[in-house]
Amino acid sequence: MDIPYTVKERPDTGLYNGKLGIWLFLASEVMLFGGLFSAYVFLRTGVETWPTGADILNVPLATMNTMFLITSSVTMVMSWASLKLKDFSKFKLYAGLTLLLATGFLIVKYFEYTAKFDHHLYPSTNNFLGIYFTLTGLHVIHVIGGIIVISFFWLTGAKMWKNDPDRFTNRIEIVGLYWHFVDLVWIFLFPVLYLL
Amino acid sequence: MADLTPEEIKHHVKTYIIVFVALAFFTIVTVSISYLDLGVGASIALALIVATIKGSLVVCYFMHLIDERTTIYWTLLATAAMFFILMFVPLGTMLAQAKV
């Protein structure tokens, strides 16, 4: 049995089902990260002094990571646009670049975390580091999730592209929406944790 | 976004490049602002304004929210309302403590 509305838009929502599904998921993600941002505000406003992120964290590395994620968002949307233009090899190129940039982000994060641990700075050290590791750790898990899904489509996409190109294009649009959300979260995490 | 012509997609690609340049520029702006001694309040306000501009660019153009169906707008409106309540919980607590 075919799953309905994977390509065709439902008359009542005006969307194919996967797209409404990912937006509902992203709405729940807003609340997940929102709860933690709320915790950050609560912790910060509850004390007399709060450290400046730049005194503890590595701003140049985080700036590099910001550029990695912003660039990966562009390559992700370009991979979708390539499929719309019926160019599968360009899709492979752009999705591959997205994966490389996402992996670069994780490598930088690994160096950042290990540098903190080497200086005996742990989540339990103080509230600032507690919320820093919680927020960035949850974000890193999302980056890893994105890498797994994009890798799956990068490795196995050729078959679906051959059999059902419109459905495959929609799948890439959906994973793209998720990936842009991961970028969006970092856009707020970066100044809040590192610069203020 | 299902029924776009190749010409429209090519136009979109040009927009993506412009948005990328804008995002890179605003990243430099965010970092530069942090080196200025503006005081805590002004620094937070400016950093959040720049982050909101960057976030809006990502949501509007990469996530195509500028050209979406009303079902998604209503979903996100409800989410935004809940998000603001969540943000005002700690601020409300702070104000309540200040009165005591």
Image: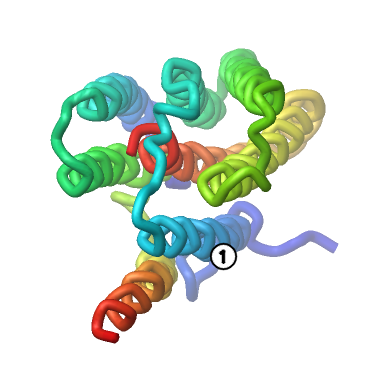
Image quadrant assignment for residue A191: top left
Q: Position of residue A158 (x, y in %)?
A: 76, 25
Indicate the secondary structure of the residue bearing disc 1.
Answer: helix
Examine the image and state in which quarter residue A51 appears: top left
Give the crowd class for mark 1: few <14, some 14-19, many >=20 residues within 10 Å: few
Residue furthest to the bottom:
B100
| Residue A196 percent coordinates (x, y) | 33, 39
Can residue A189 be seen here? Answer: yes
Residue on which the image places disc 1: A28
**Of A143 and B19, the residue lying toward us:** A143
Label 1 chain ID:
A
- In the picture, measured across the screen, residue A125 lies left or right of residue B64, that is right
Q: Quick one: A135 or A51, which is closer to the camera?
A: A51
Q: Is residue B32 above or below residue B60?
A: above
Judge left or right: residue B84 versus residue A181.
Answer: left
Q: Residue furthest right?
A: A1
Query: Does any portion of residue A91 appear in the rendered image?
Result: no
Tell me where residue A101 appears, x and y as whole percent. 58, 18
**Left or right: A129 in relation to A165:** left
**Taking A166 as reference, is A49 left or right?**
left
Question: What residue is drawn where x is 43% and y is 46%?
Answer: B1
Q: Residue at position x 55%, y 51% from top?
A: A127
Residue at 40 percent of width and 56 percent of height = A44
- Identify the amino acid type marked 1: Ser
Labels in figure, total = 1
**In the rendered view, would you say A26 is above or below B80?**
above
Q: Looking at the image, which residue is at 61% across and 23% down?
A: A112
- Residue A174: horizontal and vertical position, in percent? 58, 46
Above or below residue A54? Residue B93 is below
Report the coloring of the rendering.
rainbow
**Is the N terminus of chain A in the top left, top right, bottom left or bottom right quadrant?**
bottom right
The correct choice, above or below, for B32 with respect to B57 in the image is above
